[in-house]
Image (cartoon, rainbow, N blue to C red):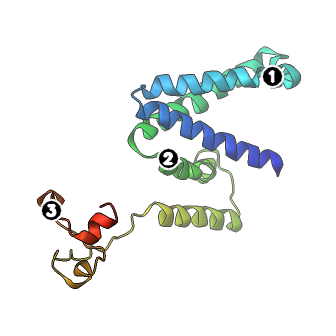
């Protein structure tokens, strides 16, 4: 469970850092390259400690290179493009579809059989993400006229053009420093 929490934390940190770089004018490709380059450097000790099977044969190394280039590189380049167009929280939330899409592709492309609980899990993921990403309606309250009741007693009120009130603040507003 601890490793799962660390993985979630680092994924959130990665998304936040990449989005922050992109929002400051860095291209999505450069931002993703920077984040993954630093992440790769941090993982070098793990490769040295556990990577012997990966490097033991050319076929193992070829699988590792393929996994790094095709699903990872292409996927995260597209994720970086998404971060440039939507908030990091939205991109990260939508990335939760990845396991569901992988399961459906396994059924359609490879011929895997997905049991009923698997389909129910996909439906739950899609349903929850739909609820999370559907914009909420905001109701607009009518703006109060500056001469309406609460404003006369010093209460808050909304004004369409605040610049029209310059120099017209009453004693109660001056006391509050407004």
Q: Earlier in the sequence, mark 2 or mark 3?
A: 2
The spot of residue 38 in percent (x, y) is 64, 23
Q: Residue furthest left?
A: 164
Q: Using the image, determine if residue 58 lies above or below residue 153.
A: above
- Residue 91's disc number: 2
Q: CA distance from mark 2 to mark 3?
A: 43 Å
> What kind of element bears circle 3?
helix
At mark 1, the secondary structure is: helix
In front of the other: 131 or 25: 25
Viewer-nearest of labels 2 and 3? Answer: 3
Q: Are marks 2 and 3 in contact (CB under 8 Å)?
A: no
Residue at point 59% right, 52% down?
A: 96
Q: Quadrant of the C terminus?
A: bottom left
Dot 2 crowding, Cα within 10 Å, few <14, some 14–19, many 20+: some
The first of marks 2 and 1 along the sequence is: 1
Q: Position of residue 124 (x, y in %)?
A: 60, 67
Sequence-wise, the earlier of marks 1 and 3 is: 1
Hey, which quadrant is residue 149 in on the image?
bottom left
Residue pointed to by mark 1: 47
Residue at the (38%, 41%) spot, across then down: 85
Give the residue number, with chain letter if any, for mark 3: 165
Q: Secondary structure at mark 2?
A: helix
Is there a contact, CB below 8 Å, between mark 2 and mark 1? no
Image vertical order of residue 15 relative to residue 52, above or below: below
Residue at image location 24% in from the left, 77% down from the top: 151
- The 10 Å Cα crowd at callout 3, few under 14, some 14 to 19, many 20 or more, is few
Q: Is 178 situated above or below 80?
A: below
User: Alpha carbon of mark 1 to alpha carbon of mark 3: how far?
Assistant: 66 Å
């Amino acid at each position: 469970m601890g490793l799962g929490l660390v993985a979630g934390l680092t994924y959130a940190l990665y998304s936040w850092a990449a989005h922050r770089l992109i929002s400051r004018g860095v291209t999505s490709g450069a931002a993703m390259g920077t984040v993954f380059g630093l992440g790769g450097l941090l993982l070098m000790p793990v490769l040295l400690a556990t990577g012997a099977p990966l490097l033991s044969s050319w076929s193992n190394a070829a699988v590792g290179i393929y996994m790094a280039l095709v699903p990872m590189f292409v996927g995260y380049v597209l994720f970086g493009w998404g971060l440039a167009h939507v908030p990091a929280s939205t991109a990260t939330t939508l990335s939760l579809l990845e396991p569901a899409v992988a399961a459906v592709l396994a059924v359609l492309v490879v011929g895997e059989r997905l049991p009923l609980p698997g389909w129910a899990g996909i439906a739950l993921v899609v349903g929850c993400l739909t609820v999370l990403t559907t914009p909420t309606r905001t109701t607009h309250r009518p703006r109060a006229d500056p001469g309406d009741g609460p404003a006369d007693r010093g209460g808050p009120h909304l004004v369409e053009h605040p610049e029209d009130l310059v120099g017209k603040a009453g004693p109660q507003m001056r006391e509050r420093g407004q």
